């Protein structure tokens, strides 16, 4: 009998959801930085064997929306509650259990089995961890609780085994050689955005969107033309830097990562364009792949 199921990862920002996703899938599917709002979309990573197909789904960290882009990010997170065969609610030893009670109430009502993963246990002691487990047991009595460290891969195999027990008998949902539901262009935008998050400070990374205008694959080479969208002229100036130095350095970092990702030589051109207040404009958000319904 073949097993297949959707395993959706939800939780607040910065608890380690993307690190966990990449561990479970065994490939770097989600970008990872220490900044909140790194993940903006719902990204699927697919694990195949002859006997099963597990479709993992990474979602944006749950936050109260301040503008349309964040409303879309919350839509991605909330949709993950309704179509999961198994729900992984990720928290850590740092955040308070009452953070984002509204979303937690929706998790309490979820019909799918919930595995509550307390991450970063290397940053606490046994006594405090036991207290935290009890607090979570009161809040999510139906959930199974697993203390983990995604960074140190502690307890990850136990979680994987439990997920496999819980997913239903079903034929595969995707082709058996599929790794993700996203096209190659999506990973180009994510890798460039990761470098922007790492390289630039303050509000700049949050005001940025990346659009791939050209992706032409030839023998051993991919030609890529990408556009960085910002909201104001001042942001454009910061992205480009003095005599183009900042843009050139960030583009080099992105190109090296893209060459590792695609295992091919990359020719990368990046331009910067101002689209005033794009984060609050429905037509642009839809164009960039965000859900607004």
Image: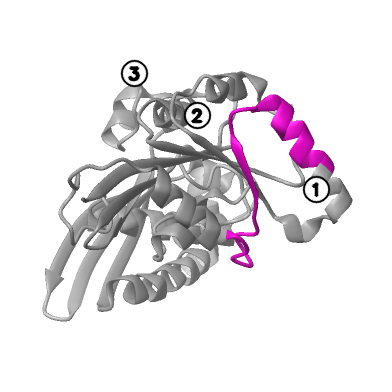
**Residue labelled with disc 2:** 70
Disc on the earlier residue, 3 or 2: 2
Instruction: Out of 109 and 186, give the one closest to the viewer.
Output: 109
How crowded pointer 1 is (Cα within 10 Å; few <14, some 14-19, many 20+) is rated as some
Give, as a single range, the part of the protein colored magenta.
131-155
Up-down: is 138 above or below 232?
above
User: Which residue is drawn at the image coordinates 52% and 62% (left, top)?
Assistant: 157
Report the residue that reaches farthest toward the front: 1
Report, in whole angstroms, how far the alpha carbon at label 3 lies from the one at label 2. 13 Å
Magenta stretch: residue 133 in it? yes
CB atoms of marks 2 and 1 within 8 Å:
no
Report the residue that reaches farthest toward the right: 127
Quarter assignment of residue 94: top right
How far across and how far down the image is residue 118, in percent? 67, 47
Report, in whole angstroms, how far the alpha carbon at label 2 lies from the one at label 1. 32 Å
Disc on the earlier residue, 3 or 1: 1
CB atoms of marks 3 and 1 within 8 Å:
no
Say left or right for 80 vs 133: left
Residue 129 marker? 1
How far across and how far down the image is residue 233, in percent? 49, 42
Report, in whole angstroms, how far the alpha carbon at label 3 lies from the one at label 1. 39 Å
**Residue labelled with disc 3:** 293
User: Which residue is drawn at the image coordinates 84% and 40% (left, top)?
Assistant: 131
User: Which residue is drawn at the image coordinates 54% and 20% (left, top)?
Assistant: 106
How crowded pointer 2 is (Cα within 10 Å; few <14, some 14-19, many 20+) is rated as many
Say left or right for 80 vs 206: left
How crowded pointer 3 is (Cα within 10 Å; few <14, some 14-19, many 20+) is rated as few
Disc 1 on helix, strand or loop?
Answer: helix
How far across and how far down the image is residue 88, in percent? 51, 41
Q: Can residue 74 be seen in this view?
A: yes
Disc 3 on helix, strand or loop?
Answer: loop
Say left or right for 277 vs 43: right
């Amino acid at each position: 009998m073949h097993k297949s199921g959707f395993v959706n990862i939800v939780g607040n920002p910065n608890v380690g959801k993307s690190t966990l996703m990449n561990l479970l899938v065994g490939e770097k599917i989600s970008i990872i930085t220490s900044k909140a709002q790194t993940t903006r979309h719902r990204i699927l990573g697919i694990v195949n064997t002859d006997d099963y197909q597990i479709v993992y789904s990474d979602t944006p960290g749950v936050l109260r929306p301040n503008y349309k882009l964040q409303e879309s990010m919350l839509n991605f997170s909330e949709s993950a509650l309704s179509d999961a065969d198994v729900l992984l609610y990720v928290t850590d030893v740092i955040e308070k259990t009452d953070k984002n009670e509204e979303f937690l109430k929706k998790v309490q009502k979820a019909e799918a089995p919930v595995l509550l993963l307390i991450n970063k246990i290397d940053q606490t002691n046994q006594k405090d961890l036991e207290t935290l487990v009890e607090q979570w047991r009161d809040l999510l009595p139906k959930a199974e609780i697993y203390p983990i460290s995604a960074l140190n891969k502690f307890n990850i195999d136990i979680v994987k085994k439990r997920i496999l027990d819980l997913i239903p008998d079903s034929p595969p949902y995707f082709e058996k050689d599929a790794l993700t539901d996203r096209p190659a262009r999506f990973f180009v935008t994510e890798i460039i955005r990761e470098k922007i998050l790492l390289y630039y400070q303050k509000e700049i990374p949050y005001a940025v969107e990346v659009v791939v205008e050209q992706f032409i694959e030839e023998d051993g080479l991919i030609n890529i033309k990408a556009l960085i969208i910002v909201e104001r002229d001042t942001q454009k100036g910061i992205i480009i830097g003095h005599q183009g130095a900042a843009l050139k350095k960030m583009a080099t970092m992105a190109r090296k990562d893209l060459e590792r990702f695609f295992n091919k030589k990359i020719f990368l051109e990046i331009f910067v364009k101002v689209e005033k207040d794009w984060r609050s404009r429905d037509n642009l958000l839809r164009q960039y792949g965000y859900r607004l319904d």
